[in-house]
Image (cartoon, helix red, strand yellow):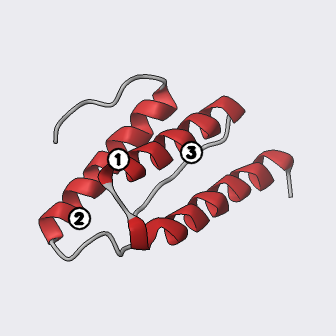
Amino acid sequence: MPPPRRAAITAFYAFCREVDDVVDETTDAGIAARDTFVASTARARGIPLASAMGGGYGDDIMAVAARHAASMRTCAAAYLGCAPPKFY
């Protein structure tokens, strides 16, 4: 496997593991910190990044949707090297 692809798969796997580990103790601030770290690290290493929330983020569907949207904004901003917009 080419090294860039191996690095991308490794980053994606690490992100999935982190998501799995924090599901039981999730806070909005914790999600933002995790997403900022993962996205900025991927950016610094030139690794493409895809993100999706896997579940376990609450029973209120609107709150889960808001967390998902915030996560996408945080990842995008960190990957682009700017501050995330505040829509929430």
Local secondary structure at mark 1: helix
Q: Which residue is mark 2?
A: 64
Local secondary structure at mark 3: helix
Q: Quadrant of residue 61?
A: bottom left
x then y, percent, for residue 87: 17, 37
Q: Is residue 54 visible?
A: no
x then y, percent, for residue 50: 51, 52
Establish if 41 lies above or below 3. Answer: above
Whichever of labels 3 and 2 marks the residue nearer the N terminus, that label is 3
Q: Nearer the viewer, residue 15 or 7?
A: 15
Q: Which residue is mark 3?
A: 38
Q: Which residue is mark 1?
A: 29
Furthest residue to the top? 82
Q: Quadrant of residue 25?
A: bottom left
How many other residues sit within 10 Å of disc 2, few (<14), some (14-19) or many (≥20)?
some
Whichever of labels 1 and 3 marks the residue nearer the N terminus, that label is 1
User: What type is the residue that disc 3 sits on?
Assistant: Val
**Separation of residues labelled 1 and 3 (CA atoms):** 14 Å
Q: Residue at x 62, y 40 (%)?
A: 42
| Foreground tag (1 vs 3) | 1
User: What type is the residue that disc 2 sits on?
Assistant: Val
User: What type is the residue that disc 1 sits on?
Assistant: Ala
x then y, percent, for residue 54: 42, 71
**Separation of residues labelled 1 and 2 (CA atoms):** 14 Å
**Separation of residues labelled 3 and 2 (CA atoms):** 20 Å
Whichever of labels 1 and 2 marks the residue nearer the N terminus, that label is 1
Q: Quadrant of residue 6?
A: bottom right
Q: Is residue 67 visible?
A: yes
Could you tell me if the residues under marks 1 and 3 are in contact, i.e. CB atoms within 8 Å?
Answer: no
**Quarter of the image with the N terminus in it:** bottom right
Q: Residue at x 15, y 72 (%)?
A: 60
